[in-house]
């Protein structure tokens, strides 16, 4: 499968714990995006990378959230000291700025904070 | 600032009938417009886009959408609905003049096609 993949697909954690999600974009896509989606809402932009550079962060991304893309390929999103309000679907998307305007999404990681 | 409105939370149609899912947008400049579909427990799948050129764009699975600048709309249409089209549909907009990512999604419209 050459699409965007995310791991894990589901994560249940207790409040206060740290969690880390991984995204593997489509090969050779230089832009990678993270979104958060809550029930009944569309995806909300969190942050994006061009290659390894993090170019933009939403104000939704509190200081408990950090994202990296160290080699310009896969990316990780870490949430520290999770809160119940962090429960959501976390979506990753990628695109090539050379030949497409649309973003291609992974299946998402569903986080439940108990 | 840019925003998207999907005025209908739910659209119900009978199989074989035409369907329309509405979307209006607001941008300060000219828009890039997109439609995505989401099936349960899945990520979003790209359906179609308007970048420039012909106002009527055709996409996957027989869907099409018409860009109407005067009405700032980008409604999704299909001439004959299938039960398998039942899903959550999202409209998204990006301001052409922005070199950032800021793509905004609507809240989604749940389409139910009944046999």
Image (tube, rainbow, N blue to C red):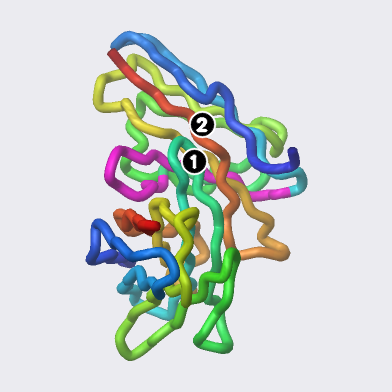
**Image: A83 above or below A106:** above
Alpha carbons under labels 2 and 1: distance apart: 9 Å
Residue wearing tag 2: A67
**Would you identify the image quadrant in which residue A114 lies?**
top left
Circle 2/circle 1 CB separation < 8 Å: yes
Up/down of B56 relative to A65, above or below:
below
Locate residue B100 relative to residue B72 in the image: left or right.
right
Which residue is pictured at 33% across the width and 81% down the height? B72
Residue A47 x/y as whole percent: 47, 43
Report whether residue A49 is seen. no
What is the crowding at mark 1: few (fewer than 14 residues within 10 Å), some, or many (at least 20)? many
**SS of the residue under disc 1:** strand
Label 2 lies in what chain? A
Magenta range is: A29-45
- Asked if residue B13 is positioned above or below residue A111 in the image, the reply reads below
Indicate yes or no whether the magenta region holds residue B61. Answer: no
Is residue A42 in the magenta section?
Answer: yes
Residue A34 shows which numbered tag? 1
- The image quarter containing residue B46 is bottom right
Q: Pick the residue in front: B88 or A23.
A: B88
Give the residue drawn at x 26%, y 57%: B10
Query: Which chain hosts label 1?
Result: A
Left or right: B51 as drawn, with respect to B5: right
């Amino acid at each position: 499968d050459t699409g965007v993949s995310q791991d894990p697909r589901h994560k249940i954690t207790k409040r206060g714990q740290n969690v880390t999600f991984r995204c593997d974009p489509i090969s050779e896509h230089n832009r990678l995006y993270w979104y958060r989606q809550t029930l009944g809402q569309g995806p909300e932009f969190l942050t994006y990378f061009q290659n390894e550079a993090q170019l933009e962060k939403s104000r939704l991304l509190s200081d408990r959230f950090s994202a990296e893309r160290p080699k310009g390929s896969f990316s990780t999103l870490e949430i520290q000291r999770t809160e119940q309000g962090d429960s959501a679907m976390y979506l990753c998307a990628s695109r090539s700025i050379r030949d497409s305007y649309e973003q291609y999404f992974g299946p998402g990681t569903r986080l439940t904070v108990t | 600032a840019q925003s998207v409105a999907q005025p209908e939370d739910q659209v119900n149609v009978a199989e074989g009938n035409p369907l329309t899912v509405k979307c209006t947008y607001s941008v300060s400049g000219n828009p890039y417009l997109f439609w995505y579909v989401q099936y349960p427990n899945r990520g979003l799948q790209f359906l179609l886009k308007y970048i420039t050129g012909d106002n009527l764009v055709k996409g996957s699975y027989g869907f099409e959408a018409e860009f109407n600048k005067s009405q700032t709309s980008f409604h999704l249409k299909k001439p004959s609905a299938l039960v398998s089209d039942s899903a959550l549909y999202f409209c998204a907009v990006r301001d052409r003049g922005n070199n950032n990512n800021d793509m905004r999604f609507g809240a989604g419209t749940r389409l139910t096609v009944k046999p």
